[in-house]
Image (spheres, helix red, strand yellow):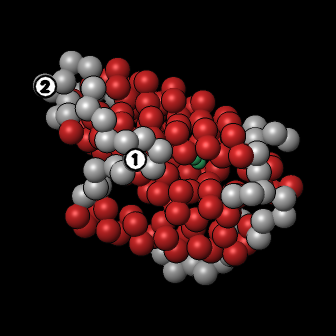
Amino acid sequence: MAHNLTQDAIALLKQDHREVKDLFEQFEKASGDGRKQKLAAQICLELSVHAAIEEEIFYPACEGKVDEDLLKESYVEHDAAKVLIAEIEAADGESDEYFDSKVKVLSEEIEHHVEEEERRMEGLFAQARKAGLDMDALGDQLAARKQELIATYKASGVPKPELTTMDDVTV
Ligand SMILES: [Fe+2]
Ligand SMILES: [Fe+2]
């Protein structure tokens, strides 16, 4: 993709949200293990890239500029999603009777998380916008890192997610 157009950071992140929502809807309607498996893999890839660019670039830029509790909750929600992503990545669909349920619960968690980010006035994005973050500069950084990560993950697979706020506990 040879585009160097500046993209607003929030527009980019919202676009990611729409794409993954669409994938969840496709998963819901899909039949056949192969198709579901493929969609689930795509969902895990896209969410992993999205969480990484937010945690590496967008959230740190929000530090000190948005409600601290809301920002902390965002990291924890990412980690909760990563646990399910790791489960879904590890499962091979056919042998995990909870496979569809895990994807469903992940979609519900993500829906909630997206709502917290996008909520009018009070959401993380609205607060970041109000705080005057340079959305054009951030958008460029997000887009560049996103391309890089997609290339890496497609070449060598999505790495096991790293948790930011939780210790590696065995339950
Ligand atoms: Fe997001
Ligand atoms: Fe997020």
Q: Residue at x 56, y 57 (%)?
A: 54
Which image quarter: residue 92? top left
The quadrant in which residue 90 appears is top left
Image coords of residue 93 (percent x, y): 20, 30
Q: x%, y% of residue 87?
A: 27, 35
At 81% across and 39% down in the image, what residue appears?
Answer: 122
Q: CA distance from mark 2 to mark 1?
A: 26 Å
| Dot 2 amino acid type | Ser
Name the element at disc 2. loop
> Residue, x 56% and y 51% (percent of image)?
16
Which residue position is annotated with label 2?
95
Of pointers 2 and 1, the one earlier in the residue sequence: 2
Q: Is residue 148 visible?
A: yes
Q: Quadrant of residue 5?
A: bottom right
Front in this rendered view, residue 25 or 68: 68
Is residue 92 shown left or right of residue 149? left
Residue 114: image location, x then y, percent = 62, 39
Residue 86 circle label: none
Left or right of 98: which side holds 146?
right
Residue 163: mark in rendering: 1
